Image (tube, rainbow, N blue to C red):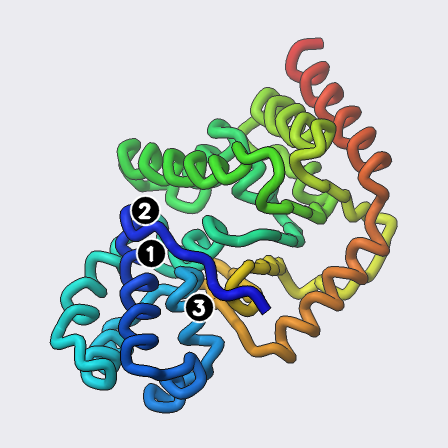
Amino acid sequence: MPGPKDLDPSSSPRALLGAELRHAREKAGLSQEELGRRLFVSGSFIGQLEAGTRRMQAEYARMLDEVLGTEDFFTRNCAAAARSKYPEHFAQAAEAEEVATAIRQYAPLLIPGLLQTPAYARAVCRAYQPTAPKEEIDRLVTARTERARILDDPTEPLLWAVIDEAALRRVTGGRAVMAEALHHLAGLAGSGRAIVQVLPFDAGAHAAMQGAIKLMDFEDAPPLVYFEGVGTGRLEDDPAVVRHQRFTYELLTACALSPEKSLALIEAMAQDYAYEEHP
């Protein structure tokens, strides 16, 4: 089994903590499982901290300093690693996206953030915070747009999105915004940068009617699933939970239109929005 890849400590405070944690653990002669037992967590949890897929919390930083004899290194640097440009409930998921090798997502109500245009993102952020200052909305839109830079790599991560037809039918930001958003979505799907399937209304009842799903796979850490609600979010690494949600996602792909038919539908809807805006 290949060993974990080296992280670039200069890329982020989180990467620095992960690299230093791995160094300190190995220097102490402990496996991930042995260190996990001393912190009352799983070995996979330690692996996620080292790989940068999970943010280090202050309580664990303090315990790591005690167990590994690193004085107050992790405690001092934990606060810097915790700073994020994303909302608190979503920060860990956004950071995990950056190092994921594959992202599979079901979006029931809106186009996924990684596939949004700035205008669409602005309409969504404004709907979430109708009284927020323009500067705050600008900051949120910039952060969401910058997330999509992970798609600049032509091969990684694999991005596979199942989007409910409801998300494409809801006129978010106006018809011109929707036309641009769907043209952008079709472009990503048509170029092969993302696999996109539409779950049509006539698919009827399906396995994920209770909400969105985001599954993330990593090279050096166990997979995660992210659950999101209104102003809330939760990362879960329990193997049974991840396995069940992966099965749910597979059921969705079976019910959805094929990528080819989905692309044709998205392109047709984009043209309809554009025509209705400028008949």
Residue 169 drawn at (x, y percent): 70, 37
Q: Which residue is mark 1?
A: 15
Q: Residues within 10 Å of mark 3 (few under 14, many from 20)?
A: many
Identify which amino acid the numbered label 2 is placed on. Answer: Ser
Identify which amino acid the numbered label 3 is placed on. Answer: Gln
Circle 1 — which element?
helix
Q: Is residue 231 visible?
A: no
Left or right of 155, for residue 13: left
Q: Residue furthest top?
A: 279
Q: Residue at x 33, y 33 (%)?
A: 138
Residue 69 sits above or below residue 230 on the image: below
How many numbered tags mark residues here?
Answer: 3
Q: Are marks 1 and 3 in contact (CB under 8 Å)?
A: no
Residue 162 drawn at (x, y percent): 71, 48
Q: Residue at x 69, y 22 (%)?
A: 273
Q: Residues within 10 Å of mark 2 (few under 14, many from 20)?
A: few
Q: Is residue 106 visible?
A: yes
Identify which amino acid the numbered label 1 is placed on. Answer: Ala
Q: Residues within 10 Å of mark 1 (few under 14, many from 20)?
A: many
Spatial CA span between label 2 and label 3: 17 Å
Q: Residue at x 47, y 63 (%)?
A: 4
Which quarter of the image is occupied by the C terminus?
top right
Left or right of 104, for residue 268: right
Residue 156 drawn at (x, y percent): 58, 43
Q: Are marks 1 and 2 in contact (CB under 8 Å)?
A: yes
Answer with the quarter of the image where residue 122 lies: top left
Q: Which residue is mark 3?
A: 48
Spatial CA span between label 1 and label 3: 11 Å
**Sooner in the amino-acid sequence: mark 2 or mark 3:** 2
Which label belongs to residue 254?
none
Circle 3 — which element?
helix
Q: Which residue is mark 2?
A: 11
